[in-house]
Amino acid sequence: MNDFLQLCFAGLALGSRYALVALGFVIIYKATGVINFAQGSMVTLGAYFAYNFHKTWGLPFALAVVMAVAAGGLVGALIQRLLLRRMVGRPVFGVIMITIGLLFLLTEVMASIWGYEARDLGDPWGIDTVKVGGVVLSVKDLWGIALAGVVLLAFFVFFKFSGIGLAMRAAALDQEAALARGISVRRVFGWSWAIAGAVAALAGISLGSGPAAVTPSLGLIALAAFPAMILGGLDSPLGAVIGGVVIGITQTLTAGYQPEYAAFLGTNFHVVMPYVVMIAILLVRPYGLLGTKEVHRL
Amino acid sequence: MSRSTQLRTAGSGRRRTSTLAVAVTTLLTVGLPASTLFAATAPKVGAACTKVNATSKDKSGKAIVCKTKNGKKVWQAVASTPSTAAATTATAAPARGLSKTAGFDGKTIKVGVITALSGSAAVLGKPLAAGQEVFWKYYNEEKGGIAGKYPVEVVLEDNLYESNTTVQKYNKIKDNVVMLSQVMGTAPTLALLPLLKADNVVASPASQDALWVREQNLFPIIEPYQVDAINAMDYAMRSLGAKSKTICAVIQNDVYGEAGLEGLNFAADKMNFDVKAVAKYKQGDQDFTGQVNDLRKAGCQIVFAGALPTEFGKILGTAAQLGFAPQWIGQSPSWVDSLLLTPLKDYLTSRVLIVAVGPEWGDPTVRSAADYAARVKQYKPDQKPDFYFTFGYFQAQATAQLLEKAVAMGSLNRDGIVKAMNSLDKLTFDGLASDYPYGPPEVRDPSRFSTMFKVDAAAPFGLRSLQFNFTSDAARAYTFAKAK
Amino acid sequence: MTPFRKDSANPSMVRDYGDDLHIFASRQTRVVLGLFLVLGVLAPLKLSNFQSTVLDYAGIAAIGAIGLNLLTGFTGQVSLGHAFFLGTGSYTAAYLGGQRHWPFLIFLLAAAAVGALVGAVVGPFALRLRGNYLAIITVGLVFTGQHVFESWTSVTGGLNGTSVAAPPRIGPLDFSRLVVFGHRFGRDQGFLYVIWILVALVALTSKNLVRSRSGRALQAVRDRDVAAEAIGIRLARYKVLAFVVSSSLAALAGALFGSYQQFVAPGDFGLFVSLQYIAMIVVGGVGTTFGPILGALFITAMPRLIEQFSDRIPGVASSPGASGITIFSLNQAIFGALIIAFLVLEPRGLAALWLRVKAYFRAWPLSY
């Protein structure tokens, strides 16, 4: 039983990281209809920012985190401002390709600046653990889970009560109608990229903290967050979190039990498990668990 | 097919400009992109260049090299290298008694180094290549190169630690080198093997798999992983009370990981213990909870790890966070000292041993270890202690012995190098590692010695030697088979 | 969305739909293509190993890209799963050609058939999913595919990969050691013939398909699938058809890739490869016949050229100890930057650039 709980906790911790990454995807998709392939590199970049501010510049960790989040948001806004603004009105496919281009560009820029060595973030959690019953909980994971919860709550409040949040909802619902009501869709796009960048930085810090350390491949996890995002539905923040947790727990349970009970599936089946779950769910529900069904019109 | 013919055609038919203009454009765009581009950018012999020893091709496709002449850097012609077909046989008359051949222009000997300079394995690949760089620098400068007159030049390629990239890079440089003095990675080497056999090229693997020992086209230099694993278990039996402990393994899911596991299983057979659980992972995995949990559930007390540093760090991190603290014994490529910069420092110091080859960096008690450290300091002052660097250095050192032999025997072509390899008595490493009795593949007898290290942040490269150069009966009993 | 457009080199007016349907739109096009043919036959005599290798890989990629273009460019189904179909072809070649020693042409055809079969299995998924959801599920396909390639060791050699001992031998001709009139071609040069003849055949077939009834149906599906269905086009049939054709071409390319490289590993068929293929059709020009070939040449040749001339590019690390960007990083970064530049500056791709040049020369020496 303890094993099971232990795996579930690990899954929850992993899932909360997927959720943070997926939230970044969702906010951009919701506002602009674009899947941002560069989200993964924005995640890594956020972690390197925190590393740079804390370890290289010697700022306190909390301040470094705040600054990294701000810097992440700035990068997001800049990408939108410099590149994607020109693409308004062009096919979405083109914008997606641009984000793929960014993925390559950013990854290599980071590898060139910070190298391939693992960089310790120097966070205060380290490898501390607390023991609850027979289950060992790492402090870093507890923080990660709390962070995902807080961000989800913040999203909820933001969309519900802030002016920009309202404008975003309007733009997502119907861009032209929103424009007609005097909402600056460009500003909405800019904000959504900025928020995605900030969330990505948080995800990066959550991923790179503790013994994990920051490497250029940190953002690869974004690929595993695809299923989380799709599972919940591309445009639902709550869906992203649910999807993240479901995928996380499924993955750790698979890793824990598949080698013993279903060895014929091959070693490391847990790596592809998220995609298998995703494919299965999409066949039953083509718009994910909570996604908005598209209306087909002639 | 040269550019001028195209232009002439375009000029002669001015009335049909549109068609021909299109034709020209087409040719420029797709027809012969490579040659056209070269023609447009090819430097001329005698023209100024920027980087000494850079190589290129001139308009006609002849190889040229950037050399200093009268204080100016200019392109100079290089005798062309023969094509694939002719590569195995000497073509031109010998300049100074030795025939020119692929990778040897009568003056300079070129050797290939294919290693990971990018990607997560670059933390191992860069020092591996740097070791070669330093050795050849030293050898060229102090000994004047092979036979005192042929300096050695390294052709460096990045394989990202990927098999497919390795094959591509090999195809790229094979006609430009006499041999490969380094191929990083067990899986990449295995991928290359059929091609090496087909072309009769010799390569020195920067990996210590037992599979290499009996291969005609491979030039392994150090005791295999299998031997390390066996010796490590011998040490565990003697000093860690392993007899009464549960022994497990975590390995990378490829030939590299399997090599260590093979040694472990051999030791299990000879020393009468069971390997209770074996967890496998794939390079690039991000989450190790499942694997670590398996080991924990099995009640493992000693875990042998055939991993690479990035993943080894994550595995140990996960273990530490699950409160799982067995005695870890890492195969040599699992370690880099930057792991000590993580919060795992205390865990590493108390729970991790590494089995490898050679003494501690600069160990004053070991003959010539201090000399070696001084030499490195002279040729690469910023080099930090690192055993991948040492491995690369050893490889270059062994390659030099092989090339000396080949030159002495009168041929640097591919057959000549194979012949020289088969008539080498032994490889020596100035006492830093045991001599390796050499000869034809059937009689090669790799060293059965290993060194046990413990993690110590104060020691160079973070490793303090526990027992230097020891062997075991089981390791002596280990025999070597051919790769399938 | 690109409308049906002629990509031939014909400046003359298109008078009716019949004109628009010609494969070779005019005599000039035929002349140009004829010139190409002559060049193509003679070129391998002159090209160095390096140049041939570049063109070999480019030709292989061109076949795969033409396939992807049929699916994405002409039918509008964005697939990031192309690498999986390439892998299917490569491993089929490794198994049938390498282990079972089937003749070259037979295992190429078998690989294409296996690709078509797998496409027919995957295609129906596309019926249920659209746009972004389809793109992501095909990402899933790549990862599951890689897992299969890694696990099915008897055929694929697992993570370690497998060597492909499948020489390009057709009857008495072995293209890896071709001798014609006493001239001995290198392996890389000999392969050029095999590969580029196939490129020509595939391009012709693709062009033919596109101008047929089925081709028009595919484009109708791309432009608005609901509308296409409303005018009586059977969506299911054509979407699956597009998948089948595209994946069989990908598998063909994969088989050639294996045979040429003599070794394949799961790493050859990762998501990056899919992205590269998407980049090829984007850079070349989506929905044109010639575009994918241009794109394939550009995307595969560029990194090799950069590598070749890296010592003249400032800021590139030349030795393992030196600081600076590695050649690999530089290539990846340039690849990314190029995609961005093309999409922002010339979304219609190289094919359109060429049209511009052509338009310029058509009016030459007048400026317009």
Image: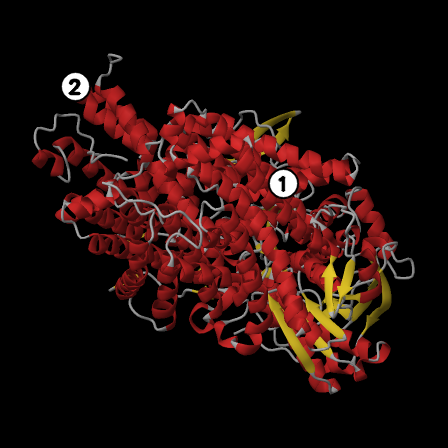
In this picture the colour scheme is: secondary structure
Q: Position of residue B39 (x, y in %)?
A: 41, 31
Q: Position of residue B232 (x, y in %)?
A: 77, 73
Which of the two residues, B263 or A141, is positioned nearer the viewer here? Answer: A141
Tell me the kind of residue under disc 1.
Ala
Above or below for C139 versus C321 = below
Q: Position of residue C45 (x, y in %)?
A: 32, 45
Quadrant in the picture for the C terminus of chain C: top left
Which of the two residues, A225 or A19, is positioned nearer the viewer here? Answer: A19
User: In the picture, residue B336 is in which quadrant?
Assistant: bottom right
**Label 1 crowd (10 A; few <14 / some 14-19 / many >=20):** many
In screen coordinates, is C114 left or right of A39?
left
Q: Which residue is mark 2?
A: B15
Q: Residue furthest bottom?
A: B272
Which of the two residues, B474 or A218, is positioned nearer the viewer here? Answer: A218
Q: Which residue is mark 1?
A: A201
Tell me the kind of residue under disc 2.
Arg
| Secondary-structure class at tag 1 | helix
Kindly identify the residue that appears in the image at 29 percent across and 46 percent down: C66
